[in-house]
Amino acid sequence: MKVFILLLALSLAMSIPLSAQIKVNHIAVHVSDLEKSMAFYQSILDLQEIDEPFKDGLHAWYNIGGGAALHLIEADRVPTEISKTNHLCFSMSDMDSFIQRLKATDYPFEDWPGKKGQITTRPDGVRQIYIQDPDGYWLEINDDF
């Protein structure tokens, strides 16, 4: 009887998923000047704006792929702690063209240690750079597309 109960419990446990399947819906970023941030995300990152329901002049939404969106939300009191460790990461299929666009517009970028104009290559071969948006938030751009 103990073996039967153990086998029944084991079979039930194996039929229950270990974790729920989830997907990223959106990432919200607090900005101090919506127009300035919109200009950055559109002109530097080339993100495409999508419809947002608020229509209050304090929100802008962008498609970031895979059904996910980036929500920019203008509000007072931008967080004061800004760290490269806390960053958004976008992968691009043609990072070289993106870097050329940064150079052409004199937009600064750096590697992980902070060397200006340099690229980090991770041990797995993925190349990455870091830039800051108008509020100083760090963005990683890599070629792990």
Image: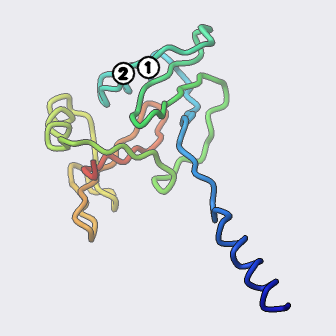
Query: How far is the residue under mark 2 from the one under mark 1?
Result: 15 Å
Q: Is residue 86 left or right of residue 14?
A: left
SS type, badge 2: strand
**Pointers 2 and 1 in contact (C-beta within 8 Å):** no
Q: Residues within 10 Å of mark 1 (few under 14, many from 20)?
A: few
Provide residue 112's location: percent of width, then percent of height: 34, 59
- Tell me which amino acid carries mark 2: Gln
Q: Say which quarter of the image contains residue 55.
A: top right
Which residue is depicted at the point 33% across and 62% down?
Answer: 113
Which residue was labeled with disc 2? Answer: 48
The front one of 83 and 58 is 58
The relative height of residue 111 versus residue 99 in the rendered view (above or below) is below
Provide residue 75's location: percent of width, then percent of height: 64, 24
Q: Say which quarter of the image contains residue 120.
A: bottom left
Looking at the picture, the colour scheme in use is rainbow
Provide residue 69's location: percent of width, then percent of height: 48, 30
Residue 36 is marked as 1
Q: Say which quarter of the image contains residue 62.
A: top left
The relative height of residue 98 versus residue 58 in the rendered view (above or below) is below
Q: From the image, which quarter does the N terminus lie in?
A: bottom right
Which residue is depicted at the point 21% across and 42% down?
Answer: 93
